[in-house]
Amino acid sequence: MTLGDYLKQQRTEQDLSQAELAEKMGVEQSYLSKLEGERSLPSAEILAAWLSALSLKLEDVLTQLDRAYVHAKLSRIPSVDAWLRQQKVQSLVRERIRMYAAVLCIALAVPMFYLGYTQLLFSETVYEYESPGVVLPGEPQDIYHLAPQMQSGGLAERQEQHLDMLKRRKPKILLLSDYRGEQFNRPIPEAVNDSFTRTYYLEETHQQPRWQNTLLQALGLFLGTFGLVLLIILLRSQKR
């Protein structure tokens, strides 16, 4: 569709005769006929008057026409040429933004995958601590380990002390993601004061996969692949 065809179509849709439109434009009807028939190329002023009479914008009209036709035929009109230059600048800006986005994706992908793979942010090591029981005020923190050495008296008394310690044993296990040393003390929350504590001893460590690391690796791979593909497409388009 040519410029004349399109604007003639718009005139028809607005129920304007050729004579009425020519009057609104301030030109002869015969000249408007030449314009619609593409037998004459309008100047920038005539084109502006033409579009104004039909209440149309230049960019809205040009986007409806074939880009090759606009370049070949209409670019000789200063206003159209200016629009084409503006479109080219905007296209270059968009292309540069896409280029920066591709590079940014690749730049983010490497550290993101590395953090997930090395587990630097989210450690997958789980430390298992066990406390044999509650430590009463005045007792050494490792009372349950020292109990056999602290027993005194006769056999019956030592057996009774041993049974008392066995009754007091209420093991409790903690699984922690951070290392607290070979042992640490913790007050009992439900106790009246902080005098009642538990001593936790490191028993063993486990490896427990965390979804955060899997997600970081997956995002890293996705961003890297997306950025690389986008970069290749952009570089190829520049060579055309």
Image (cartoon, rainbow, N blue to C red):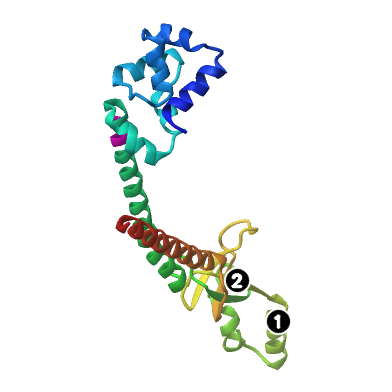
Q: Is residue 238 above or below residue 43?
A: below
Q: Quadrant of residue 12?
A: top right
**Residue visible at 33% across and 59% down in the picture:** 235
Residue 108 in the image: x percent, y percent? 38, 60
User: Looking at the picture, which amino acid does disc 2 mark?
Assistant: Leu
* 16 on left or right of 114: right
Q: What secondary structure is the stretch in magenta mostly built from? A: helix
Q: Is residue 237 above or below residue 81?
A: below
| Mark 1: few/some/many CA within 10 Å (<14, 14-19, 20+) | few
In this figure, which residue is indicated by the disc labeled 1? 166
Is residue 51 among what the camera can see?
no
Q: Nearer the viewer, residue 105 or 197?
A: 105
Q: Quadrant of residue 174?
A: bottom right
Residue 154 in the image: x percent, y percent? 67, 92
In this figure, which residue is indicated by the disc labeled 2? 174
Magenta span? 82-86
